[in-house]
Image (cartoon, rainbow, N blue to C red):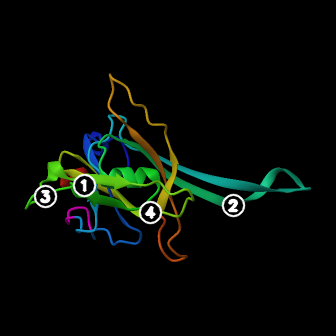
Amino acid sequence: MAGNNGKEIRVAGTGRVLIAPSGTDAPANATDNWGTEWTDLGYTTTDGIKFNKKDKIDPVDTWQSVSPARFIYSDRDLTVKFQLLQLNKANLAFFMGGGAVTVTAPAEPPTVLAEDLKEFSYDLAHTPAPDERALGIEFTDGAAKYRFVIPRGQVTETEEISLTRTGAVKLGVTFTALAKNDQSALASFRIKELSSSYS
C-alpha cells in the first residue's frame, strides 16, 4: 500500500563499483557473489555515484490544437558519474580508454618477483578505440542491498587529473550505457529489501 513509510527511505551508506568485459553476466540476484570476471575499482570519493537518465521527447504539433497531439521518444541517455581514488592498473586503463598494462621485470630479477619490485607500463594510444565494459554498482543500507548493472557501455567523458600536494589524485569518469540488442535491457536493478518494509 502506498503512503508514508520511513522504512523505504534509502541512504547509500557504503557501496562499490565494479567492471567486467562487455556482456559479462551479472549475479542473478542481489545477494549472489560477483563472478571472477568482475573487478572492484576500490575507493571512490564521498560524492558517491551520480545517475542521470535523460530522454529526448519531440512533440507532434498539429494545426488543430495549440497543444501537442502526442510525443515521440527520439533519444535516451543513461550515464553514471563517479571519481575513483585508487591509482592502479585496472583503474588507469579504465580511465584512459582501454589498452594493456604490462609488467616489466627488474634488470636482474630475483627468484621471486615481489609485488613491490614490479614495474608497470601503460602506453596511451594515439588513436582512440572503443573500450566497452560492463558496469556494476551496489550499495547497502542496513539489511537492504541494491545492485545496478549496465551490461554494455563505455567511458565517454573524463575529468582533468589534478596532482597537488594537499589532495588525493582523482580519476573522474562518466560512463554511458549502450544498447546490447533490441531485446535486452539497457540497465537492470537487483533489490534485496528489508522484509519488514513490505505491507
Q: Specify the amino acid type for callout 4.
A: Ala
Residue identifier under label 3 = 113
Q: Looking at numbered disc 3 in the image, what kind of residue is underneath it?
A: Leu
Would you call the spot at circle 1 few (<14 residues within 10 Å), some (14-19), or many (20 or more)? some
Mark seen at residue 193: 1
Q: Which residues are magenta?
A: 29-33
What kind of element bears circle 3? loop
Rendering coords of residue 69 (x, y %): 79, 58
The disc labelled 2 sits on which kind of residue? Ser
Q: Residue furthest front?
A: 108
Nearer to us of marks 3 and 1 is 3
Say whether residue 59 is magenta: no
Magenta region includes residue 31: yes
Q: Residue at x 20, y 66 (%)?
A: 32
Looking at this view, name the residue that lies furthest to the top.
Answer: 166
Disc nearer the start of the sequence (2/3): 2
Identify residue type, mark 1.
Answer: Glu
The numbered dot on residue 187 is 4
Question: In the image, is 58 to the left or to the right of 45?
Answer: right
- Measured Cα–Cα span from mark 2 to mark 3: 55 Å
Q: Is residue 161 above or below residue 122?
A: above
Circle on res. 74: 2
**In front: label 1 or label 4:** 4
At label 2, counting other C-alpha atoms closer than 10 Å, the crowd grade (few under 14, some 14-19, many 20 or more) is: few
Q: Which residue does the image show at 17% across and 50% down from the upper left?
A: 117
State which tag comes first along the sequence, 3 or 1: 3
